[in-house]
Image (cartoon, helix red, strand yellow):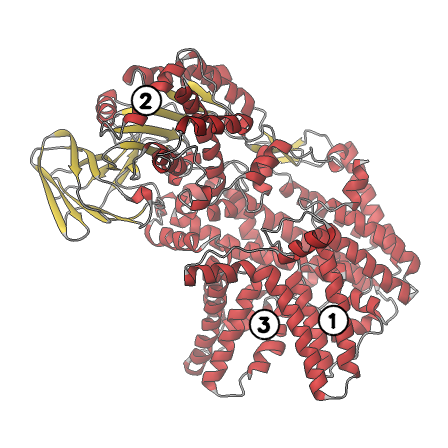
């Protein structure tokens, strides 16, 4: 077989494929249902990729990102008040603002919202002096699972304003992997959520601040049900001085027995029937905490929080599959009570990604999301709310990856909902480079987004969280210079 | 003219690989010129050397200079070894070549592992500096980043290939190639340059001096194996990776034990179809130009024990490690304990060859242990020589489970992720969501099933299909190739599987 004949064979195959690409319908041939036959159009076959976004490239190239938000590499925080006591802070802040102005994708702040943000800055600044904890509630979808994004925000906010500890967590997580601790549990605990598919056997809507609770098994038989947290050493998120437990007991006289470091035992007796908030100050370093629940008829744990005595705390409230529409479906009594107990200074709402693939009516989503924001404004008046829009997400069209056509309408719906309710908005999609920027994140080495072209590994999440933090700090700088 | 720069300039985001249209256009142009000059052997070899360098330039950019340096250095050292009659000179020559090759490999591949290990062992904070880039910047005013050392594509393959040539010259097992162009052609032949197989000089060099020949049967086989490789790599491997496996491995802690386990089984298939698919294409592409590359995979998941697996998996590497590491270490000639020690050293270094991290060492170590344990077990097993189908099935099953288990360290991005995966399988298996997972990812699981079935199906059937294809007329081969490309396109262009949540 001569090479020329092989060449002719290849040319025949290639030529026929080219011919097919010309005549094959661009929209494909439907086989019914979700099945569709496709073939590349001739234009797609030789299409040049759109030029890589210089902006996105620059973000990726200059990002000092690591998997670990607490690693030294990533610690380029805005200003470290505690480390520069003898320097004129204002000049540092001014210089930093100037450099941030060039690089930060800023917050969009409607009239009136700036004042509320300043209230947060003021409270956060004075939290150490006033010995109080100011809380940032970071609600979001699967993009923030396993403390992604939140861990970096927590670390940086705490570096600036003080504070430590990992915040509020459910008794039993969806899956294990919190970077601050390793967790074990004993007993038949079941986690119920107020987002996603609700369990039809639950006859109430009391899900609390974390929008989920964990049912405590009855202590009538066998060993007491328990959860155990072993904190990883050397991390700010592992250091805490206050232990807060939010739970509901079904009868009087229940007990929670706390064991610290396998040596100290503290029995918290006589829980009342109904909602209980247990608060314990620890004057020692707890590296291991085991909580046994002696509740005769069982109960439900709304959350366990590991907090500082003073400073800022940031809670990671990941709601897998959620579009941020759960508050209107949640009983407000427990939500209200918990919210007031934790002293919220700022609420972050990061949603939209779960709407993008299925969105048919942006106006409807805007309306429903607006309703949720209004509810939050009612139950926590004065607390500033920042809405973070969805990040870039790709799908395939004609075999080529491209941003969902519904993404920008969803982003716009969230932006309008936020601004019309006096909330601040941060456009993550634009901040990361806009259309098709996720492709650069996936192509980065090491990757900053996963191959579903939607989610971020810790490295990518840290990059975006850092950008958001800088945007908040830009406003803080303005507040300081006023 | 952007299309001109697209064709000739290096773009790290678009390496020249078999799964891209651009490669096949490149190959078409190569065939065009080849069909004119193939009768002139010197010109043919020089042409293939140059297009191979271009291929490597398009794949790795300026790293092609490393390939050129390695080619020249080892060619002349090899000649010196061959000409020298003094044993000491020959030893110095082979030692120098091995040093140069291993130094290059260590510099580019293991610098970070070495520095990281020193830092964690001695609590130091040494930073990796690219001295090559620094030297170039100082000398020629280039602006290479000195803070990173990038890994040239395929360096592990061509380094081992070059070492085998020089060592075989030292052992007087082969004669040297006639000129540096021929040697360059042997080292850099583009079909096998970046992912093997690792071709021995004794297998390839004689072909350099032979006339081109290709029978109709070989032509049919080459086209068949190229289609098979593309199907395995794109239709099966890429689809299940993008839509399922990569997502789970990116965040094992975020998924149930069942999903993690399925991702692991999926990965066992993916790594096979990906790697063997690539070498299938390489073998087919080379054969169409008249060059026969050795078989690299032989249905590895049909292996009945770990030893048998390593005779079927990445055969060119296994035999390389046996001939140039295990046997020189003493092989099985120095007693039972030393045989085991030699096996472990070979597998640990074999693990390290695959990647510069402790995970690959663990992977190699577990495989080594598997080999050692099997050697002991086969002495006492009553079923070792049984040919009963149930025994054989059981052995295949157990071997496959073991190999899949070792993949945890091969695939996980970090030790943390490997531990998370194991923890999820052990503590959060979540059997209740199995039906929902299977239903939601039905296409992924169907493709996985197809992959495993086609792997485990009898060789007789596979051979029958191959023979049928070979016998078809050329026009039918053209039509079948079009159908195969069309089918592969369906998988490649399929919508990304949306993220599905099974438990909240």
Query: Which one is closest to the eye, mark 1 or mark 2?
Result: 2
User: Picture coordinates of residue B150 (x, y %)?
Assistant: 62, 53
The chain under label 3 reads B
Rounded to the nearest angstrom, the CA distance separating label 1 from label 2 is 69 Å
The residue carrying mark 3 is: B311
Q: Quadrant of residue B296?
A: bottom right
Identify whether A451 is placed above or below B75: above
Rounded to the nearest angstrom, the CA distance separating label 2 from label 3 is 69 Å
Image quarter where the C terminus of chain B lies is: top left
The residue carrying mark 2 is: A122
The residue carrying mark 1 is: B74
Marks 1, 2 in one chain: no
- Closest to the observer, B88 or A365: B88
Identify whether B208 is placed above or below A85: below
Q: Quadrant of residue A383?
A: top left
Image quarter where the N terminus of chain B lies is: top right
Q: How crowded is mark 1: few (under 14 residues within 10 Å), some or many (20 or more)?
A: many
């Amino acid at each position: 077989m001569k090479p020329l004949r092989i060449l002719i064979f290849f040319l025949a195959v290639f030529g026929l494929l080219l011919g097919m690409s010309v005549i094959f319908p661009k929209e494909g041939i439907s086989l019914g249902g979700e099945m569709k036959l496709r073939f590349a159009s001739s234009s797609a076959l030789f299409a040049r990729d759109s030029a890589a976004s210089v902006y996105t490239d620059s973000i990726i190239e200059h990002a000092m990102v690591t998997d670990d938000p607490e690693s030294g590499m990533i610690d380029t925080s805005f200003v470290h008040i505690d480390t520069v006591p003898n320097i004129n802070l204002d000049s540092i802040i001014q210089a930093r603002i100037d450099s941030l102005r060039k690089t930060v994708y800023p917050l969009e702040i409607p009239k009136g919202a700036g004042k509320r943000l300043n209230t947060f800055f003021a409270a956060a600044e004075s939290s150490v002096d006033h010995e109080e904890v100011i809380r940032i509630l970071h609600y979001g979808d699967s993009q923030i699972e396993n403390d992604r994004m939140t861990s970096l925000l927590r670390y940086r906010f705490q570096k600036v304003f003080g504070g430590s500890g990992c915040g509020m967590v459910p008794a039993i997580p969806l899956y294990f992997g919190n970077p601050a601790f390793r967790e074990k549990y004993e007993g038949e605990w079941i986690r119920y959520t107020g987002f996603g598919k609700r369990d039809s056997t639950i006859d109430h809507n009391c899900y609390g601040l974390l929008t989920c609770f964990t049912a405590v098994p009855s202590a009538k038989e066998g060993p007491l049900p328990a959860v155990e947290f072993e904190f990883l050493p050397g991390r700010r998120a592992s250091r805490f001085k206050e232990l807060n437990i939010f739970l509901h007991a079904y009868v009087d006289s229940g007990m929670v027995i706390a064991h610290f470091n396998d040596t100290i035992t503290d029995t918290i007796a006589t829980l009342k029937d109904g909602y209980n908030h247990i608060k314990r100050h620890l004057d020692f370093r707890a590296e291991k905490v085991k909580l046994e629940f002696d509740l005769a008829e069982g109960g439900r744990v709304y959350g366990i929080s590991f907090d500082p005595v003073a400073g800022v705390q940031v809670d990671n409230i990941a709601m897998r599959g959620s579009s941020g529409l759960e508050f209107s479906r949640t009983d407000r009594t427990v939500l209200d009570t918990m919210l007031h107990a934790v002293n919220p200074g700022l609420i972050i709402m990061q949603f939209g990604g779960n709407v993008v693939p299925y969105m048919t009516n942006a106006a409807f989503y805007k309306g429903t999301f607006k309703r949720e924001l209004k509810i939050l404004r009612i139950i926590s008046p004065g607390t500033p709310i920042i809405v973070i829009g969805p990040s870039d997400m790709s799908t395939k069209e004609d075999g080529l990856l491209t941003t969902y056509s519904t993404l920008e309408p969803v982003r716009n719906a969230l932006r309008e909902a936020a601004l019309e309710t006096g909330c601040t908005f941060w456009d993550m999609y634009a901040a990361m480079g806009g259309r098709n920027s996720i492709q650069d994140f996936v192509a980065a080495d090491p990757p900053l987004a996963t191959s579903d072209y939607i989610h971020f590994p810790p490295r990518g999440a840290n990059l975006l969280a850092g950008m958001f933090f800088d945007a908040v700090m830009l406003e803080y700088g303005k507040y300081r210079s006023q | 003219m952007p299309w001109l720069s697209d064709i000739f300039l290096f773009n790290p985001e678009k390496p020249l690989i078999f799964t891209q249209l651009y490669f096949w256009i490149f190959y078409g142009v190569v065939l065009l010129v080849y069909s004119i000059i193939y009768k002139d052997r010197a010109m043919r070899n020089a042409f293939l050397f140059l297009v191979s360098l271009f291929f490597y330039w398009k794949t790795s950019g300026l790293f092609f200079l490393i390939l050129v340096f390695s080619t020249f250095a080892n060619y002349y050292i090899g000649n010196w070894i061959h000409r020298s009659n003094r044993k000491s000179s020959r030893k110095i020559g082979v030692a120098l070549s091995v040093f140069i090759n291993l130094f290059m490999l260590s510099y580019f591949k293991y610098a970070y592992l070495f520095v990281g290990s020193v830092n964690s062992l001695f609590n130091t904070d040494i930073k990796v500096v690219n001295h090559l880039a620094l030297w170039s910047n100082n000398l020629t005013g280039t602006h290479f980043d000195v803070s990173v050392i990038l890994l040239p594509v395929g360096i592990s393959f061509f380094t081992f290939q070059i070492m085998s040539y020089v060592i075989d010259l030292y052992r007087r097992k082969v004669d040297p190639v006639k000129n540096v162009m021929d040697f360059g052609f042997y080292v850099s032949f583009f079909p096998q340059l970046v992912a093997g197989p690792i071709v021995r000089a004794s297998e390839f060099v004689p072909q350099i001096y032979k006339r081109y020949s290709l029978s109709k049967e070989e032509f049919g086989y080459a086209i068949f194996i190229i289609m098979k490789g593309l199907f395995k790599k794109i239709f099966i491997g890429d689809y299940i990776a993008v839509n399922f496996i990569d997502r789970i491995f990116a965040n094992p802690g975020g998924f149930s034990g069942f999903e993690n386990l399925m991702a692991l089984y999926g990965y066992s298939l993916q790594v096979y179809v990906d790697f063997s698919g690539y070498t299938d294409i390489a073998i087919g592409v080379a054969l169409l130009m008249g060059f026969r590359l050795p078989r690299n995979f032989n249905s590895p998941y049909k292996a009945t024990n770990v030893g048998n697996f390593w005779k079927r998996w990445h055969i060119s590497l296994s035999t390389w490690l046996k001939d140039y590491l295990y046997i020189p270490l003493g092989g099985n000639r120095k007693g039972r304990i030393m045989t085991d020690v030699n096996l472990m050293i070979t597998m640990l270094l074999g693990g390290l060859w695959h990647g510069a991290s402790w995970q690959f060492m663990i992977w190699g170590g577990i495989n080594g242990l598997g080999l050692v344990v099997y050697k002991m077990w086969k002495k006492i097993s009553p079923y070792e020589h049984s040919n009963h189908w149930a025994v054989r099935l059981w052995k295949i099953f157990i071997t496959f489970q073991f190999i899949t288990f070792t993949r945890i360290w091969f695939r996980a991005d970090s030790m943390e992720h490997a531990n998370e995966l194991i923890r999820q399988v052990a503590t959060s298996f979540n059997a209740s969501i199995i039906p929902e997972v299977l239903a939601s990812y039905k296409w992924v699981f169907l493709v996985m099933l197809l992959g495993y079935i086609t792997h485990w199906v009898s060789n007789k059937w596979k051979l029958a299909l191959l023979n049928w294809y070979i016998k078809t007329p050329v026009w039918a081969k053209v039509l079948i190739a079009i159908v195969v490309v069309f089918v592969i396109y369906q998988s490649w262009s399929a919508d990304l599987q949306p993220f599905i949540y099974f438990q909240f």
